Image (cartoon, helix red, strand yellow):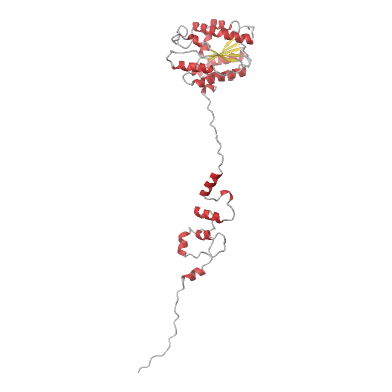
């Protein structure tokens, strides 16, 4: 029987695989760039053991690796910040890092007063001083010179209807008598133009006893009735400021056009508003224009040839209507007439 070979071969060590838990147990401590999930679950202790979750899970949840530790809650999502703010022992300073939902809730509990800014009132054109265009410079400069050099007792202020007294000297003489008069009317004037001239040449140096004002008909088609009234009242207030001792007669706007003209209704509205309310100082409103209207509401072309400006006969009617009011004002202010001046 054959003999077996009884040599003993050296034992070969058996290679064993290390379990997965060995790697997790021997893993180094987490760096400052640990996953957010680990930071959220361990807010109280900075030296706590790292998360035991598998590496695959950690890789899915963590954001891109950063070289520096993120500032407090700077990169955390809204849900994480809300959870951490509840766990913190110290309150968040003045909502600096509070999530949007918390800020909205607090703002509702502590509303801040919102200042209400009222819109600035718009000044109408009728009360905004404006110089005349170049076509009226000659007459405007003449009127400014009169206002700076005259010492008349009666001053007439207005538009072309007032300027027209210079073409009716006898009618003007019947109005003022032996008293001196200064005609400061400029054709085409509106309330804003009169305001401008009174600013350029105040009437303090003139120191008149009576001022006769008739203005506004040139504003009829461009401005509202209320704005025209505001312009007339602004002129009256300025005249009273410059000449506080003068009697101011604010004449109504005479009718113009045919009865169907839209200006008729607006003029009637303006005169009705001027008749109401208080006037400053010695100013008062005087109605003299209705005498030009016929029974049918028409204007007589013998008095107003163009249904706007007066003829010689029209100025005679106008002077006769104004004279009682003017005499009353002169008697109250200066009973003795003064010498006339060469200019109207």
Q: Quarter of the image containing the C terminus?
A: top right
Q: Is residue 82 above or below residue 201?
A: below
Quadrant for the N terminus in the image:
bottom left
Task: Reply above or below: 77 against 329.
Answer: below
User: Can residue 343 be seen by looking at this rendering?
Assistant: no
Measured as percent of width and height from the top left, residue 291 is found at: 49, 9
**What percent of the width, then of the height, locates residue 73?**
54, 54
Q: Is residue 315 above or below residue 243?
A: above
Q: Total label count?
A: 0
**Along the line of sight, the residue nearer the viewer: 143 or 339:** 339
Q: In the rendered image, which quarter is residue 4 located in?
A: bottom left
Name the residue: 49% across, 68% down. Answer: 24
Q: Residue at x 46, y 70 (%)?
A: 20
Residue 322 found in image quarter: top right
Q: Which residue ends up furthest to the front in the rendered image?
A: 109
Q: Is residue 233 visible?
A: yes
* Position of residue 89 measured from the top left corner of the image (x, y, whole percent): 59, 56
Q: Residue placed farthest to the left in the image?
A: 1
- Residue 339: x and y, percent? 63, 6
- Decide which of 273, 30 is in the foreground and name it: 273
């Amino acid at each position: 029987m054959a003999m077996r070979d009884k040599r003993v071969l050296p034992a070969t060590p058996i290679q064993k695989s290390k379990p997965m838990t060995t790697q997790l147990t021997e893993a180094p401590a987490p760096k400052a760039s640990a996953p957010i999930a680990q930071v959220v679950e361990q807010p109280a202790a900075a030296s706590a053991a790292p998360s035991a979750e598998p590496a695959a899970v950690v890789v899915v949840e963590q954001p891109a690796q950063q070289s520096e530790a993120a500032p407090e809650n700077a990169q955390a999502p809204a849900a994480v910040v809300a959870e951490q703010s509840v766990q913190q022992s110290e309150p968040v300073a003045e909502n600096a890092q509070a999530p949007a939902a918390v800020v909205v809730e607090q703002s509702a509990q502590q509303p801040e007063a919102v200042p209400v800014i009222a819109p600035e009132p718009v000044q109408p054109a009728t009360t905004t001083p404006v110089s005349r265009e170049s076509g009226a410079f000659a007459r405007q400069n003449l009127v400014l010179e009169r206002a700076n050099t005259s010492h008349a007792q009666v001053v007439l202020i207005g538009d072309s209807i007032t300027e027209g007294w210079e073409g009716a000297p006898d009618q003007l003489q019947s109005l003022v008598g032996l008293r001196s008069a200064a005609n400061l009317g400029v054709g085409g004037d509106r309330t804003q133009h009169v305001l401008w001239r009174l600013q350029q040449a105040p009437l303090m140096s003139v120191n008149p006893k009576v001022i006769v004002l008739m203005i506004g008909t040139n504003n009829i088609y461009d401005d509202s009735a209320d704005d025209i009234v505001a312009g007339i009242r602004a002129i009256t207030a300025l005249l009273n400021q410059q000449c506080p001792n003068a009697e101011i007669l604010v004449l109504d706007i005479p009718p113009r056009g045919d009865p169907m003209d839209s200006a008729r209704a607006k003029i009637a509205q303006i005169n009705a508003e001027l008749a109401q309310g208080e006037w400053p100082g010695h100013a008062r409103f005087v109605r003299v224009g209705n005498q030009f209207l016929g029974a049918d509401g028409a204007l007589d072309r013998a008095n107003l040839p163009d249904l706007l400006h007066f003829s010689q006969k029209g100025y005679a009617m106008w002077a006769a209507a104004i004279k009682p009011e003017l005499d009353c004002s002169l008697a109250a202010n200066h009973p003795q007439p003064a010498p006339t001046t060469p200019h109207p």
